[in-house]
Image (cartoon, grey):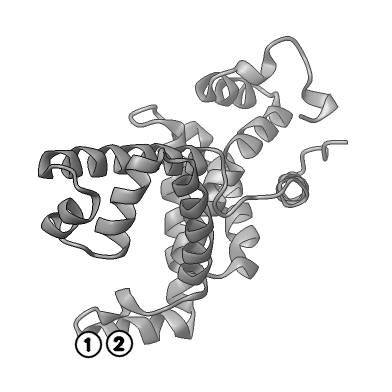
């Protein structure tokens, strides 16, 4: 965290407390909001635009609009939800301006939304990252769960074939498969929560904060 914002428990302030203090004149505290939500907004924007080159601009516009309209935030929803809605609107507006978005709409109209299965750079990245994570998670599974998962989910063997192969009961096959899925789901959940997917690096975080502050006329953090 920037030295200008270092004080006792300042990072523990709630969004509402930060907003209240920003509106009261402590404008530089807005940096806390940006750094708190940069990673989330980046991932949401990436999932919509599929274009990393325009994301920082969209995020900056989002933060500027949010700042200029902080007084309208009424806590009917969480601030994070309110901020994300602004980002989504900005992302969709940007998409509507692009020929690619128009092409997608036309293709969906003529093909019955078959574009959902079209390969994209984001899907390729996700598939690669998730494949690596899943592989590591599988390695960590106890062998009895891992083998059942591989036979049933990867090799597409039937329950009967799995029973014959492993010489265990049908009930055991079902229990072990469910247990394997639970462990894997937990592993992937930790991965998501730890910003493992579409990470927003510190240099970009700093750049967004500085650009927004310059636009708003707030002294740029040191």
C-alpha span from label 2 to label 1: 6 Å
Front position in the image: 89 or 173: 173
Are dots 2 and 1 in contact, CB under 8 Å?
A: yes
Residue farthest along the right direction in this orientation: 222
Q: Which mark is residue 111?
A: 1
Front position in the image: 198 or 66: 198
In terms of secondary structure, where does tag 1 sit? helix
Count neighbours of disc 2 (C-alpha within 10 A) and say few if under 14, some if 14 to 19, many if 20 or more.
some
Q: Residue at x 52, y 74 (%)?
A: 121
The quadrant of the picture occupied by the C terminus is top right
Front position in the image: 203 or 71: 203
Q: Where 6 sits versus 99, above or below?
A: above
Residue 219 % position (x, y) = 82, 37
Q: In the displayed structure, does residue 45 sit left or right of residue 167?
A: right
Q: Which residue is mark 2?
A: 107
Q: In the displayed structure, does residue 173 sit left or right of residue 50?
A: left
Count neighbours of disc 1 (C-alpha within 10 A) and say few if under 14, some if 14 to 19, many if 20 or more.
few
Q: Residue at x 16, y 55 (%)?
A: 164
The quadrant of the picture occupied by the N terminus is top right
Q: Residue at x 77, y 39 (%)?
A: 218
Q: In the displayed structure, does residue 33 sit left or right of residue 99?
A: right
Q: Where 12 sits versus 205, above or below?
A: above
**Count of marks, rendered view:** 2
Residue 137 % position (x, y) = 47, 45
In terms of secondary structure, where does tag 2 sit? helix
Residue farthest along the bottom direction in this orientation: 110
């Amino acid at each position: 965290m920037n030295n200008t914002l270092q004080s006792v428990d300042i990072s523990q302030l709630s969004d509402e407390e930060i907003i209240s203090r920003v509106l009261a004149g402590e404008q530089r505290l807005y940096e806390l909001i940006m750094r708190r939500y940069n990673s989330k907004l980046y991932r949401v924007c990436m999932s919509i635009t599929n274009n990393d080159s325009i994301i920082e601009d969209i995020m900056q516009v989002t933060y500027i609009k949010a700042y200029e309209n902080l007084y309208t935030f009424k806590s009917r929803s969480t601030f994070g939800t309110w901020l994300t809605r602004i980002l989504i609107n900005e992302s969709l507006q940007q998409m509507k301006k692009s020929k690619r978005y128009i092409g997608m709409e036309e293709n969906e109209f003529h093909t019955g939304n078959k574009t959902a299965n079209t390969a994209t750079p984001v899907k390729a990245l996700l598939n690669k990252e998730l494949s690596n994570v899943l592989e590591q998670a599988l390695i960590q599974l106890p062998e009895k769960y891992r083998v059942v998962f591989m036979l049933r989910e990867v090799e597409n063997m039937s329950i009967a074939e799995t029973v014959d192969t492993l010489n265990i009961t049908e009930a055991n096959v079902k229990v072990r498969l469910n247990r394997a899925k639970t462990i894997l789901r937990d592993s992937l959940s930790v991965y998501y929560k730890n910003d493992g997917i579409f990470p927003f690096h510190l240099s970009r975080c700093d750049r967004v904060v500085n650009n927004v502050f310059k636009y708003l006329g707030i002294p740029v953090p040191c």
